[in-house]
Image (cartoon, grey):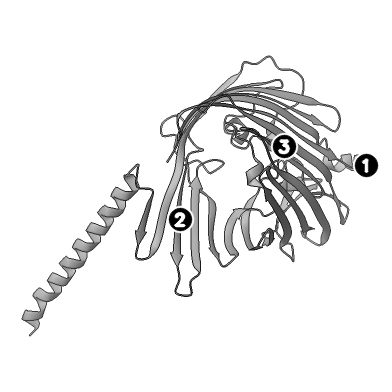
Amino acid sequence: MMQQAAPNRTLTMTTKSTVLKTLTATAVLCALSATAQAATIGGTDVTYGGYIKLDAMWSDYSAGAPAGTNVGRDFYVPSTLTVGADNNSDAVFDMHARQSRFNFGTSTLLDNGKTISSKIEIDFLASAAGGNERVSNSYAPRIRHAFISYDGWLFGQTWSNFQNVGALPETLDFVGPAEGTVFVRQAQVKYTTGAWSFSLENPESTITTSNGMAVTDDASLPDFTARYTHTADWGNLVVAALARQLTYKVGGLDADETSIGIIASGMFKVGQDNVKFMLTQGKGLGRYVGLNVAHGAVLNGDELDAIDSTSGFIAYQHNWNNQWRSTFLYSFFSADNNTDLLTITGDPTESSQSYSANILYSPVKRLTFGAELKHAERETESGVDGDLDRLQFSVKYAF
């Protein structure tokens, strides 16, 4: 009996191995296919996409360029713009493909007639280096999005409900209006019903102390947002509010402060063109605005003093024809720092602004060549300033 059973087990193992290899080969072929972007597997619709993007840029800093490893060399980050006396150093050249990304999604119709969907997306920006520019130029992937959606609920990491991604203009720079936009992805639970959405999101505070910036994660409550979206033939308008708790619990200190903010943003159609805008005002917004160009609050003794700020942008996109288009952008940020606390804060950013214009050419729908010129300025509370002039060229293929 045992001698007769052995060939059956061998046959079963061989069959399983063959099936596994076949499925693996099929999956690899689907992943490598330039045209197969969707498939149905066992009742689940599977999609994938992303893009490959090459960025090359010359950057001329009035006060000298930051180190080559600085994230501001890969894309515009207002807080990294150097300030001080004019420096006659040459412009620096950088080239990378780190903005390239890949996403994978699923959608399944359940027995109750409802659909559950998921998405995960990665790129390689602002991540730990996995190699060096001398040899491999390899970088670690980072999670951008990882969430599931079911019956109006979203669970996982994605754009903050306080942010309107649809208002961001088309730019070659990774963010574009960096100082003027809300820009946050984080873990959250969100519920959407009609034009309204509400979320509880991961809390985190950036606090200025006498020893520099402290990042704390000691809040007792999640960040709360509420948002209303109005869509019409002329475009859309989004209004959102944020309420959160800033905290600093280190040693014997237990300080907290309430942070609130409001935002209005949207898009207006102008014939074949469009105008996009955003205006944000709040107290203690910190990391939510301008890529954290200002902190949320200052630790003053055993109390937190929240920093007020106003920011925004306006962008006009003109379509020259069905292959050529341009975006003209202005973005700004202004902080109302408490000057009585400068002995603690040192010389924080008081304002930041940038202008940019680009020309984009798409000979076919998914392929874009472009050039973009950006001028940016940052000024500290004492009046020390610096500026950046950047010329960027990019090639992008979306799949």
At mark 1, the secondary structure is helix
Counting from the top left corner in percent of width and height, residue 361 is at: 51, 25
Q: Amino acid at mark 1?
A: Asp
- The residue depicted at 66 percent of the width and 61 percent of the height is 194
How many residues crowd around disc 2 within 10 Å: few (fewer than 14), some, or many (20 or more)? some
Residue matched to label 1: 340
Q: Amino acid at mark 2?
A: Gly
Q: Amino acid at mark 3?
A: Glu
At mark 3, the secondary structure is helix
Visible residue check, residue 30: yes
Pointer 1 with pointer 2, Cβ within 8 A: no
Residue matched to label 3: 179
Q: Closer to the camera: disc 2 or disc 3?
A: 2
- The image's mark for residue 105 is 2
Occupied quadrant, residue 58: top right
Counting from the top left corner in percent of width and height, residue 71 is at: 60, 36
Alpha-carbon span between mark 1 and mark 2: 51 Å
How many residues crowd around disc 3 within 10 Å: few (fewer than 14), some, or many (20 or more)? many
- The residue depicted at 91 percent of the width and 39 percent of the height is 339
Quarter of the image that includes the C terminus: top left
Query: Of callouts 1 and 2, which one flags the residue occurring earlier in the amino acid sequence?
Result: 2
Q: Closer to the camera: disc 1 or disc 3?
A: 3
At mark 2, the secondary structure is strand
